[in-house]
Image (cartoon, rainbow, N blue to C red):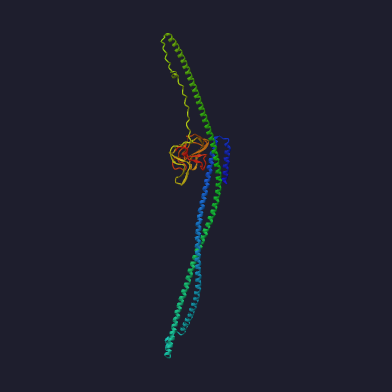
Amino acid sequence: MKLKLKSKWMLSGISSVLALTIFLPTAANADKLSELEQQKREAQQQQSELNSGINEKSEKMTQNASTLEELSKKIDKLNTKIQDTETKINDVQSKIDQTVAEIDELRKSIVELERKIAEREELLQERARAIQLSGGSVDYVDVLLGANNFGDFIDRFSAVNTLIEADRDIMREQAEDKKLLAEQKAAVETKLAEQEDRRAELVGLKSSLDSQKQEQAGLVKELEAEQQRLQEEKATLEEQRNDSIEVSSKLEKEIAQEQERLAEIARKAEEERQRKLAAERKAAQERAAAERAEAERKAAAEIAAAQNEADRKAAERRAAEERAAAQKKEASSNSVTPASASASSSANSPAPAAAPAATVAPAASSSGFITPASGRYTSKFGWRNIGAGQEFHQGVDIANGVGTTIMASASGYVSFAGSMGGYGNVIILTHSINGQTHATVYAHLSSIGVSKGQAVSQGQRIGGMGNTGRSFGSHLHFEIHVGPWNGSRSNAVNPASYVSL
């Protein structure tokens, strides 16, 4: 909104300046061009700031997109880990379920063992009670000696052995079953505890992975919100930049119109100069013709006077000759033929005066331009590469020391004098040569000796050579344009075709 208001103010200011142009003299017109140039620079600066802001938003969006991509990859990895963990949990749970089934079987076996142990305990307790009631341990010797015969003895011995072995088996089985019971109980409890621990570990890992996933999802949501905000801000800046470009375009057009006006002034001045030169040449020719006519008149008068004098002298000679002849005729009969008169009269006559030579004006330059500075020709017009890739060089470079005099290549008017980006300190002149508008550019100057709107003559010092702007050493960057200068420099021509380098 601020930019739009400022744009309207700038356009209003331009309109006011244009309205005043009709009533102000040349200096005021130059001020108008200066204001337009200043407004153009402000618009360009604002456009540059907006472009910078747009680029910054784009970079942040690119970084966010990269971060989102990395987060997505991390989330995919977490999902894979979570799936693996869930698979492991399911596997452990399956093993736990199997262990529970095994425990159920073991419990049944334990119940059976406990039953057998209880029965043996009962049997052993019965035996113990019997021994206690009999007053002590059973006397197996008395049983054997109480046999009636050998067969009875063998039977009794076998019975005693059977009883003793039975007691031993009972005691041994009882001990083994108790040991097995203890081992089975311990194995079941250990296995179940291990699987429960493993399950708890996996559940904890899954919980951690779920937490990480939620955290990553939160970051993704924040980044997506940030991306949306940046996109909206970028769109706003682009809209403002479009407004700025529109204003800058109008200013560019206004500056072009102003240059056309100055070019028209230069053309009229050139016409007036040519008219004066023609009038002076005509006056000089008329003066020369009058001088020639006067010289011819004087010569003719001198020739006529000389002829009259010659005729008078000839008449006098003829009269003298006649008198001499008469006298000689009378004096002597031996008359002698008088000598022939010398035909030197024409030689004695004065020669006609030569006409004075006419003054010849010096020949004008064929292009109307002169070389603007002395020095070495270091860079030509056209494509070149100075380390940043191929670029088109719109002029020529002339190198010399800082402060070397820079002259106007042709007479004209100063349409710009100041700093302009890569040009550094620059002067732009508008000319009218043989009815054609031209512009010349003098860039990278160390000093500027003219001001906007000022009329300059060909060869006049306008500034000093320097190293300002995009420059890599003291030199003059010189351009010639057929037509007024424009920002794209689309009408630049090779200066080598116009000046001697």
> Residue 154 at what x, y percent from top left?
42, 88
Residue 98, image x and y in percent? 50, 71
Residue 204 visible at all: no
Where is residue 497 shown, x and y percent of the image? Answer: 47, 39
Q: Nearer the viewer, residue 184 or 333?
A: 333
Q: Which residue is situated farthest in the front direction here?
A: 333
**Above or below: residue 29 compared with residue 337:** below
Q: Quadrant of residue 268?
A: top right
Residue 397 % position (x, y): 45, 40
- Up-down: is 200 above or below 60? below
Which of the two residues, 417 or 205, is positioned nearer the viewer here?
A: 417
Q: Going 49% across and 23% down the picture, which residue do you hit?
A: 296
Say above or below: 238 vs 401.
below
In this rendered view, identify the residue nearer to me: 321 or 305: 321
Q: Name the residue at 57% across, 42% down.
A: 11
Closer to the camera in the image, 278 or 423: 278
Q: Quadrant of the C terminus?
A: top left
Q: How many labels, in total?
A: 0
Q: Is residue 101 visible?
A: yes
**Direction top: furthest residue:** 331
